[in-house]
Image (cartoon, grey):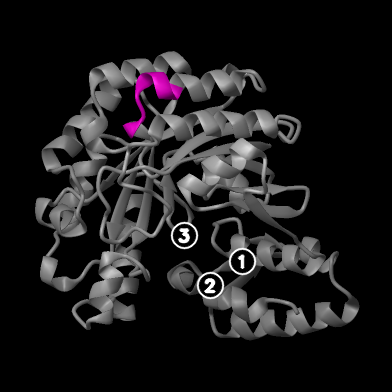
């Protein structure tokens, strides 16, 4: 399987934690949409086979008008049969969800929503600089069900500072009452270049302690699993059969092709990323200049990626597959590292698959680095 990603780099305002590529100036929105279709045309021979998913992310794709969305979908229809895709997702913010928008999304083939909730606490939402409030969250979830989007995901952020005094049980209970098919739960990270990053530099904000992070992570996992959600990736939970096809393609190192400024692609062992500047993207695509950079991954790069991505998932990684791409000497070195982490209770070996100890899942990046081959 393989997927298509389209990056829509516009937001009404900047969330204090977000370091994705976006602009709060909407003046070039329609122009940029037209240049995304030009990129689709330029790359129509690059589309991978067996595409099962289309994902519109951002930014805030729900800011696009119906006409702008139609322009993109009509361009894609020249290359693929959208109606045959298993999963067509668009990220939406609660304040953009209304009956007219949902009716239109269904009409063009969208069958999955990813709703940027983040919290149901108005104080927390204001602190994050989100536009919506709790009432808009609840209305968006109600409308999603009303318009029979049975497959919808919500984003939720935990790991926020203690002074916010959040009641996670109350927030999660409120959300799962609406039976989202999927929940993506992310720990707050303070990134350079963001407002929170600025506060961190001034010593006015800091990440919560690791022990507290672990407690909140384990509580969320237990709470959601007790409500019927499968914790299938470190940050993702789903009801039976509702795992994200698109994100699973990433974790399985399957091909995907990305369009728009800042979008990434992975095709034929090569990673490629578009320029993260709207004006430069428009200029370079228009003149057919180079608007991207790329990198051919070595066999060892791919092995390391397999390890890193596998440790993020419930399925882990197949040790035989890894060993088949390593010399005898590197196999021995890797095996020694694996045994060390098993003894430290970070890893588990079962039927020749390596998994993270679920209680230590937050240390998956550390474990991956320890196992990387050079």
Report the magenta residues as a range: 63-69
Q: Which residue is mark 2?
A: 365
Q: Which mark is residue 11?
A: none
Secondary structure under tag 2 reads helix
Q: Marks 3 and 1, how far apart in space?
A: 12 Å
Q: Nearer the viewer, residue 54 or 360?
A: 54
| Main secondary structure type of the part rendered in magenta | helix
Q: Residue at x 29, y 26 (%)?
A: 144
Residue 247 position, x and y percent, is 54, 46
Let me know if residue 113 appears in the view. no
Residue 262 position, x and y percent, is 52, 50
Q: Marks 3 and 2, how far apart in space?
A: 11 Å
Let me know if residue 275 appears in the view. yes
Q: Is residue 246 magenta?
A: no
How many C-alpha atoms fall within 10 Å of the one at disc 1: few (<14), some, or many (≥20)?
Answer: many
Q: The N terminus appears in which quarter of the rendering?
A: top right
* Mark 1 touches mark 2? (CB < 8 Å): yes
**Comparing labels 3 and 2, the label whose residue is closer to the camera:** 2
Q: Which mark is residue 234?
A: 3
Q: Residue at x 36, y 16 (%)?
A: 104
Q: Nearer the viewer, residue 365 or 219?
A: 365
* Mark 3 touches mark 1? (CB < 8 Å): no
**Comparing labels 3 and 1, the label whose residue is closer to the camera:** 1
How many C-alpha atoms fall within 10 Å of the one at disc 2: few (<14), some, or many (≥20)?
Answer: some
Residue 316 position, x and y percent, is 62, 61
Q: Is 83 above or below relative to 16?
A: above
Relative placement, left or right, of 317 versus 114 is: right
Q: Marks 1 and 2, how far apart in space?
A: 7 Å
Q: Is 176 above or below relative to 63?
A: below
Q: Which residue is mark 1?
A: 308
* Mark 3 touches mark 2? (CB < 8 Å): no
Q: Residue at x 28, y 38 (%)?
A: 93
């Amino acid at each position: 399987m393989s997927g298509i990603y389209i990056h829509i780099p516009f937001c009404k305002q900047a969330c204090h934690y977000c370091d994705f590529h976006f602009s709060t100036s909407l003046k070039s929105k329609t122009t940029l949409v037209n240049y995304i279709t030009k990129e689709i045309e330029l790359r129509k021979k690059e589309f991978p086979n067996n595409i099962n998913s289309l994902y519109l992310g951002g930014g805030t794709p729900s800011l696009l008008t119906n006409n702008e969305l139609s322009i993109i979908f009509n361009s894609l229809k020249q290359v693929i049969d959208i109606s045959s895709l298993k999963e067509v997702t668009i990220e939406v913010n609660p304040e953009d969800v209304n009956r007219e928008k949902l009716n239109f999304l269904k009409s063009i083939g969208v069958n999955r929503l990813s709703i940027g909730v983040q919290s149901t606490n108005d104080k927390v939402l204001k602190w994050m600089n989100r536009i919506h409030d709790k009432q808009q969250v609840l209305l968006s979830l109600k409308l999603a069900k009303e318009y029979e989007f049975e497959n919808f995901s919500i984003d939720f952020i935990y790991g926020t500072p203690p002074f916010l005094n959040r009641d996670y049980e109350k927030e999660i209970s409120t959300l799962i009452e609406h039976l989202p098919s999927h929940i993506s739960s992310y720990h707050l990270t303070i990134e350079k270049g963001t407002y929170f990053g600025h506060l961190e530099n001034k010593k006015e904000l800091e990440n919560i302690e690791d022990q507290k992070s672990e407690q909140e992570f384990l509580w969320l996992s237990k709470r959601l699993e007790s409500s019927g959600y499968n914790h299938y990736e470190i940050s993702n939970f789903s009801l039976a059969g509702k795992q994200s096809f698109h994100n699973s393609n990433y974790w399985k190192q399957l091909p995907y092709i990305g369009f728009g400024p800042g979008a990434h692609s992975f095709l034929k062992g090569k990673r490629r990323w578009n320029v993260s500047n709207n004006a430069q993207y428009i200029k370079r695509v228009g003149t057919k200049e180079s608007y991207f950079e790329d990198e051919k991954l070595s066999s060892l790069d791919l092995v390391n990626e397999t390890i890193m991505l596998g440790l993020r998932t419930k399925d882990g990684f197949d040790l035989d597959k890894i060993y088949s791409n390593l010399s005898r000497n590197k196999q021995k070195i890797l095996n020694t590292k694996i045994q060390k982490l098993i003894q430290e209770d970070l890893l588990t070996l079962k039927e020749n698959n390596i998994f993270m100890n679920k209680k230590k899942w937050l240390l998956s990046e550390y474990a991956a680095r320890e196992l990387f081959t050079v």
